[in-house]
Every structure is written in C-alpha cells, then in structure tokens.
Image (spheres, rainbow, N blue to C red):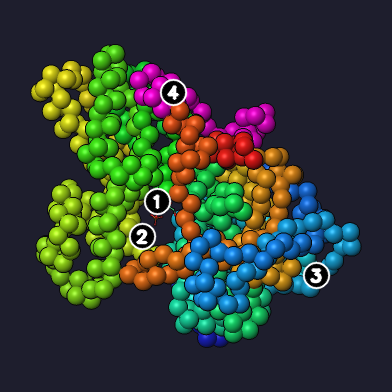
Amino acid sequence: MTNIHFPTTNHHNITDKKIYKEDSQSIKIDYLCAYKRKFNFKPFINQTMKKSALQVARAAYEPKLPIVLTGAVKAVAGEATQSVADQDAIKALFPNTYGLPELVFEKNDTPTKGEPINVGVILSGGQAPGGHNVISGLFDGIKKINKASRLYGFLMGPGGFVDHKYIELTDDIINEYRNTGGFDIIGSGRTKLEKQEQFDKGLEILKELGIKALVIIGGDDSNTNAAVLAEYYKHINAGVQVIGCPKTIDGDLKNEQIETSFGFDTATKVYSEVIGNIERDCNSARKYWHFIKLMGRSASHIALECALQTQPNICIISEEVEAKNMTLNEVVNSIANVVVARAEQGNNFGTVLIPEGLIEFIPAVKKLIAELNDLLAANADEFAKVTADQQRQYIIDHLSEENAAVYESLPTGVARQLSLDRDPHGNVQVSLIETEKLLSEMVGKRLAQLKAEGKYNGKFSPLHHFFGYEGRCAAPSNFDADYCYALGFNASCLINAGVTGYMSSVRNLTRPSVQWIAGGIPITMMMNMERRNGEMKPVIQKALVRLNGAPFLKFAAQREDWAVNTSFIYPGPIQYFGPSEVCDQPTMTLKYEHENK
Ligand code: FBP
C-alpha cells in the first residue's frame, strides 16, 4: 500500500487503492487519483505503463558500488578546508559550516548497526539521467542502516518541500524506477530555496515526519541553497542534516573534489549519437551545413565533449570567445572562413556545434546582460507596468550609452529574450534563444558579401537543430547508473556519519567503479562571492571550460584538420549490454582530465 499525503493542516493520509498486475512485458499500475487531481502530479499514478524490452532488461541491472561502500564504513576526516575564494566573506556567512574537513570513507572492521532514520529527498532543477538511481541508492543505503528507516520524496522540486507536498517512497515505487531516466518519480522544479520563511516552513514538515536529514539533488545553484539551508538549520539547532548531490547535464558542477556531475555522461553520449548520425547524413548527401545548438546554459562542456566524440568541422567554445574578446561578427567570420575553405574543395557541407550559452560569453553582450540584470532587479515593479511594445525603448533609455548601443545592434528576438524573465536563480533562459539560426543567418550574409567580392563560389544551405531535452531523461549509461547509485548510497553514509553541509563525493571515476573513492566535501569549500540580481551572494563557483585543460587542448590541436578534412566519427547509440570497451567508457573529458593525474 502506498500512502499519499495532502498538505492540509491535519495531514490526512489517504490510502490508495492499488491494482497491480504484471506480465513479462508490461505492468499496469492504477492508483486512486485524488492525489493527481489535487497536485496535478502523477508519479506513475493511474497510468498504464507499458515497458519496452530494454526497460524490462534494464530494471534487472545491478549498479556496481565502490567496494568500500559494500561493507561497514568509517569516515576519515582530512584537514580543515577553506572556500575557493573570498574566504573571509564566506566564513562570515557560514560560521557553523565553514572550514569543515573533507571526509573519505574507509572500511570499518566493526560493523555498526544504526538507528532507523527518516530522510527527505528533493530533485532540483533540470532533469539529468540517473536521478532515479541516486534516490534508489539513498533508499537502499538508509534501509541498510536500519530496515525501519523511511524515505520521503518532496514533489516537483524545492516547492514541494515548502508547500508540504510529498510522497513516501516505498520498495514497490523505488523498484519501478531503478536504472530509468527522468525525474518523474517525484518530479523536479526550479523554486529557489533562499528565504528564512521557506526554511521554517520546510522545517515544519520535516518535524512532522520525523525527518532528520534532507538530500538535495541539484546543480550549483541548488547545492548553494543546500549549503545555506544546512547553515541555517545548524544555527537554529534544528537537528536536521542537509546533504547535496552533484547533478547537471551541463557538467559545470565540478572541481578538484567533484570530478563530474551526474547526467553529463549519458546526455553527451545521446547528443553525440545524433550528431554522428547527422554527420553521416551530411557526408552522404553533401549538400547541407548543419548548425547544431547544444544545451549547457553557461559552460561549453557539452559542446566540447560532443566535439571530441564526433569531430565536427567547427565547434565554438564560449569560454574561448570570451578569452579572445571576440565580437559576434568575428565568430561569424570564423565560421564563414571554414565554409569558404571547404567550398574550395567542392565540399558544400559540414557540421557546426554551438553551445547554447554562447551569446552570454560575447564580452559586449556579457556586459550588457550584467547591466540588464541590475537594471531589471532594481526597477522590477516599474518594468512590470511597461507595455510589451514599450519595453525595448524603456530598456534602451535606461541602459548606459555603450550597452544601449549593443542592445540595439542585436536582432530584436535575441534582445527581447535577454530582457525577459530570468529563471528563479537569475539566469537568462538561453535555451530559448535560437543562436543556431542567428549564426547561420549571419554566416549566410557574410558569404553573400564574399561572393560579391569574388572570394566565394560555393552553395550554402543551412539546417538547424537544438539538442537538449532529447538527452536529459535518457536511460542512464552504465557509468551514470553506477555513479548515481553510488552518490545516493554514499549520501546515506554521510547521513549516518552525522554530518551536514556536505556534498556526496565519489571519485577516481576513470577506474572501474569498484575502485571508486567515496566521501564528502564541505559545500562551503566550493564557494565564492558573485553578483546575482544586483547583489553579492555566496555561490558555488561554476566550472567553465579551462582553456589550458587537457580536453580543450586535445580539441584545439585537431580542429584545423577537422575543419577542412571530413574526419567525422560516428559513436552510435549508448550500449547497455556488451563488451566493456563499448559499454563502460567514461566521457573523453573525464579521460583527458585524468590522463596526467
Ligand atoms: P540544471 O543546471 O538545473 O541542471 O539545468 C541545466 C539545463 O538543462 C540547461 O542545460 C538548460 O539551459 C536549462 O536546464 C533549461 O532549463 P529548463 O529545463 O527550465 O527549460
């Protein structure tokens, strides 16, 4: 029986009537759907879920844990830590959780049986393959500590925590979701947890359910919030631990201690498969230039990894554009030059990879966005009253002369997108900006100019693609299935060790999973101060592509060859069963980053 809970003051438990029939290929699960009507959320409620053959086979996959986590563990503490930058400011803001030591789990010869513990879990932000395995690892971990432990999932992200919407995650639910993609077990959301009222409201439900630890599975912003929440609960002696887990397909939540965020592996493999297919089509038809935008709100890790896997003719790396102080026209010219060079060899086709965050990295646009952020934050009420057709002029009138000129020079659609609502964390919603079309249009214009000057005589037919949502919920690769399960299981060990304000850390990831190292990293260690919505805030430092890092250098050493020659690689789909060299490879980014370690 599954208990569903309503956010009423009395918290009536409505016991579901469940009909559960199973045959070899399909499972029908039908739940009384009062719950669905109330929350408009269906974690497999009242759905007929037919399963594909792969889903059925994949359900039987047993993720491999680091060997150390298969028995009793003890937490071994290292030296006290400090934040990556702005130490005084971060220390002052986190007096209770700053400077904690790194932890590594080691085998414990005396097995310890823990007390039952109730734990809450939240999925926060964009989906990433493997989230369900983090939850199943956490579930198995707390049950191993004590069978009477219970896991509660807050619905649709941090909002469910604040609004007291939750579900108890029981064995039968967890088993439905093992090794599956998506976040649909409890849903996800982008509500920003930042206000004391939210923390206090959340604490009410934690107390009511006897929850002693909360696990927040999210990206840099959500883990920043986890650190703030951990600090607050420690400060008020709430008796609740907060643990983070590193999630994001973008790959930008990583550092010396967190080698990669989960989901990056699977998502980049999915995109690389499709890019490879496009390359093969491109090489067969020989008549199109494919402009492919890839997700990755800020950092270009996804584009870079896909380039390493598929060897396209061009891949723009936003961080390089910024470092070289390039203008949009210079980016366009660099693409046009390759189109011309290929046309000279009779090759009027090619592939261009574009990171979705590119526009924000063009230095002039970056300055403009910084001023826009402050302007919109400071004048939010006034701006809300400006009619849609007057907004452009309002912005131009209120910007500095330099930024107003840049704003005016952008295509209207792009300019408008820059001034639209930010996500709750203050980010421009770059996935809505059609950079691939903007660039191909500008390249087309440049080529027309060159043609008029007699410098180009080719044919340019662009096609456009955007890959992002296609990869975020894919069935996790073996790497992500194992990594995520280990992160969740490891989180249960951190809970059992009694710590708070830590991120679950599993390292040594280019080695077989049994050799992975498990432990915890104080979240404050990853923080610095950044300007957000017009104010300086403590945040986890985003990991951008390092231009002196091995993955970028490998790419840079080969890209001229890839540009003119057709050196495409076709990675094909993720393989879940078969030889290890096909099924268990980590990303090239991870491999190259580890090569010299
Ligand atoms: P997270 O940082 O929350 O993991 O999300 C990343 C991402 O997939 C970006 O790549 C993309 O820009 C954004 O989410 C899209 O957001 P939304 O899901 O709200 O459309």
Q: Which residues are magenta?
A: 558-587
Q: Which residue is mark 1?
A: 298
Residue 408, horizontal then vertical, whole percent: 14, 53
Counting residues from the N terminus, which is met first, the one under dot 2 or under dot 3? Answer: 3
Q: Could you tell me the amino acid type at mark 4?
A: Phe
Judging from the image, what secondary structure is the residue with disc 1 in? loop
Q: Label 1 neighbourhood size at 10 Å, few (<14), some (14-19), many (20+)?
A: many
* Residue depicted at 37% across the width and 66% down the height: 532
* Residue named by callout 4: 568
* Sooner in the amino-acid sequence: mark 2 or mark 4: 2
* Residue on which disc 3 sits: 114
Query: Separation of disc 2 and disc 3 at Cα?
Result: 42 Å
Q: Is residue 311 left or right of residue 375?
A: right
Above or below — where is 496 with respect to 325? Answer: below
Q: Is mark 2 within 8 Å of ligand 1?
A: yes
Pointer 4: residues within 10 angstroms few (<14), some, or many (20+)? many
